[in-house]
Amino acid sequence: MGGRTVSRFVLAAGGTGGHMMPAHALGAELVRRGHGVALITDARGMRFPGLFEGVETHVLPAGRLGGGLFGYLRAGRSILAGRSEARRLFRSERPAAVMGFGGYPALPSLLAAFADKMPTAVHEQNAVLGRVNRLVAGRVNAVATAYPDVQRAKGNVRLVGNPVREEVLALRDQPYPPLDTEGPFRVLVTGGSQGASILSEVVPEGLGLLPPLFRNRLQVTHQARAEDIERVRARYAELGIPAELATYLPDLPERLGRAHLVIARSGASTVAELAAAGRPAVLVPFAAATDDHQTYNARELVAAGGARAIPQGQFTAAELAKQMEKLGLEPAALANAARRAWSVGRPNAVRDLADLIEEIGA
């Protein structure tokens, strides 16, 4: 332990994989350091298999602000109920610090920590400070960010990056897969933890427009929503493109390591994993994302030359085919894009985030 004080920390996260994945990575690092860890989440946060196994977990009420007057009243009741449960938990657990990961499940825990004058921090995965983190940024001890330039950031801002899974970090030391103008061209399509119907609608059609010599080299792995998967599978078959489809990819890091190109949303975890692994991408920011944060998420990777971003309104089969031809017919350009993506990775994010929570909890 090197003289490190053993402490207990509470991580508050829920909702989407964008919140849960960094919290899981931090929890694993804290356990490795000998600390105790507890997770506070909501029902949605319990849906992700393989996360927080063996970690004490508490599911608390967490209201979602919105839906008019009655929606706010319902949310307020849930938040207050969650705050009361969290205070009871903290009185028995006495954590050294509480870290929220944005999203509504974090709010009751942070409010409880404020009431008990406990050290707190939040981690912002996106390039725009989220609503809950904006509400509490002025009261927490530190705001950890994933990007050097985060819109609406305030308070004690500390750049740490976005923690990614160990399996993805391991790809950082692996070279970009060999690629020539005749061998297989492996494409990974993923919409993140929520899936993305627009990728299922556009990507097969775009790949089908590629010249036959290029199209015949394709090997596709496509993560799709359950309601889309059979239709998409049938369309790839009609186009004669070998494709493996799934609603969830437990071996995503392995597939990312083999991919020559990724077509994806620009959610926080996806962008962080692309940079950590050094894989070029075509990114399609989710147009309805709060504060258009996915467009901001993509900017650093695009500016570095590691990705191309296509606004959702311009994401057509023809545009995708055009971008694919530019990328896929120049192996050297793709390998260069992979290096540029790698250059903006922050492989020490989980270490730096763990150092931060230890610091504020000391």
Image: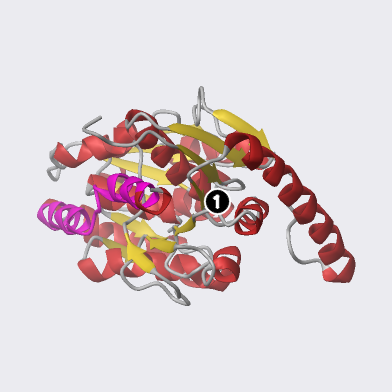
Query: Which image quadrant is residue 230 in?
Result: top right
Q: Residue at x 34, y 73 (%)?
A: 149
Q: Position of residue 220 (x, y in %)?
A: 37, 38
Quarter of the picture holding the N terminus:
top left
Which SS does the magenta portion mostly show?
A: helix
Give neighbour class at mark 1: few <14, some 14-19, many 20+ (Cα, 10 Å): many
On whether residue 208 falls in the magenta region, the answer is: no
Q: Is residue 318 left or right of residue 64?
A: left
- Which SS class for mark 1? loop
Vertical comparison of 28 with 344: above or below: above
> In the image, residue 197 lies at what x, y percent?
58, 51
Q: 186 or 357: nearer the eye?
A: 357
Q: Position of residue 297 (x, y in %)?
A: 40, 65
Name which residue lies at 67% across and 42% down.
42
The amino acid at mark 1 is: Ala
Task: Give, as a single range, the part of the protein colored magenta.
Answer: 332-358
As drawn, which residue projects farthest toward the top?
54
Q: List the residue tagged with mark 1.
A: 196
Question: Observer-nearest residue: 172 or 33?
Answer: 33
Total numbered badges shown on the rendered structure: 1
